[in-house]
C-alpha cells in the first residue's frame, strides 16, 4: 500500500503542476487571441432594419451588435423561438470592434428559425449584425474545459494518495528496540520481560515442593 500511496501522491502533484501551467498559458493566450481576430470574418448575418427571421444553429453561440451611434444601455433585443426569449443582455466594450458595439448574446438551445428584434429606447435601429463568437474561440474553450477536468482528477488522485499514506503510516509495525546487556548480547526488552513473566513451569513446581 505504501508504494501505491507514494505513486498516487506523485502523480497527483505532477498533475496539479501541469494543470496550473496549462491554465496560465491558456489565460494569457486567450487574452491575446481576441486582438488577433478580425471579427468581420465572423459576421453571420447583417440585417437592414431592426427585425428579421434568422436560422440559428444550436451548436453555435451568437452575439448581437449595433452601430456605435447607439449606446449599449439604450438598446435591447428579443430573440424568440417557439414562444421563448433566448436573448441575454451583455454589454462588454472589450468585444466592440470597428463601428459596432456589443449589446447581448443569444443563448439558443435549439436549431431553427428565430424571430430577432432589436429595440432602441430613443430613435430606431437601422441595422444590426449577428456574430459567431464560439467557432473562432472554440478550441480555446475546449482546452479550458479539458484543463479543468484534468485539474479536478489530479486533485482527487493527490487527496487519495495522501489518505493512503496516512493509513499506511498508522498501520505500520513499530520498530523493535534492542538493548545490549552486560554479556554483550542484544535483546528485545519486551520479549525478555514476557519470558520472565511466564517463567519455567518446572522451576515453579520444584520451588513449591521445596
Image (cartoon, grey):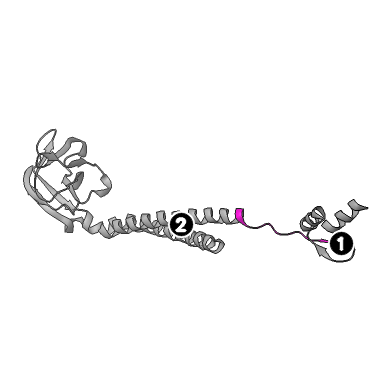
- How far is the residue under mark 2 from the one under mark 1? 49 Å
Badge number at residue 40? none
Q: Which residue in the structure is indicated by mark 1?
A: 181
Magenta region includes residue 173: yes
Kindly give the residue lying farthest to the right in the view shown: 210
Q: Which residue in the structure is indicated by mark 2?
A: 157
Residue 16: which quarter of the image? bottom left
* Side of 28 where 42 appears, left or right: left
User: Magenta residues?
Assistant: 170-180
Kindly give the residue lying farthest to the bottom in the view shown: 184
- Give the residue drawn at x 18%, y 54%: 60
Magenta region includes residue 9: no
Q: Which of the two residues, 65 or 107, is positioned nearer the viewer here?
A: 107
Percent across and percent down for residue 68 are: 18, 44
* Side of 18 where 33 appears, left or right: left
| Badge 1 element | loop
* Side of 27 where 65 appears, left or right: left
How many marks on residues? 2
Percent across and percent down for residue 155 are: 45, 54
Percent across and percent down for residue 148 are: 37, 54
Amino acid at each position: 500500500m505504501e508504494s501505491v500511496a507514494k505513486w498516487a501522491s506523485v502523480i497527483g502533484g505532477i498533475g496539479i503542476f501541469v494543470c496550473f501551467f496549462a491554465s496560465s498559458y491558456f489565460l494569457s493566450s486567450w487574452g491575446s487571441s481576441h486582438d488577433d481576430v478580425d471579427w468581420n470574418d465572423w459576421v453571420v448575418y447583417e440585417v437592414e432594419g431592426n427585425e428579421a427571421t434568422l436560422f440559428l444553429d444550436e451548436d453555435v453561440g451568437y452575439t448581437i451588435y449595433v452601430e456605435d451611434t447607439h449606446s449599449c444601455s439604450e438598446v435591447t433585443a428579443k430573440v424568440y423561438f417557439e414562444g421563448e426569449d433566448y436573448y441575454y443582455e451583455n454589454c462588454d466594450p472589450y468585444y466592440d470592434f470597428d463601428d459596432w458595439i456589443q449589446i447581448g448574446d443569444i443563448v439558443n438551445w435549439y436549431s431553427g428559425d428565430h424571430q430577432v428584434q432589436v429595440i432602441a429606447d430613443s430613435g430606431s435601429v437601422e441595422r444590426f449584425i449577428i456574430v459567431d463568437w464560439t467557432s473562432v474561440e472554440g478550441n480555446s474553450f475546449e482546452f479550458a474545459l479539458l484543463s479543468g477536468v484534468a485539474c479536478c482528477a489530479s486533485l482527487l488522485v493527490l487527496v487519495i494518495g495522501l489518505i493512503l499514506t496516512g493509513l499506511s503510516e498508522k498501520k505500520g509495525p513499530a520498530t523493535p528496540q534492542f538493548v545490549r546487556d552486560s554479556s554483550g548480547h542484544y535483546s528485545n526488552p519486551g520479549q525478555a520481560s514476557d519470558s520472565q513473566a511466564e517463567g519455567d513451569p518446572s522451576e515453579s513446581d520444584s520451588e513449591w515442593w521445596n
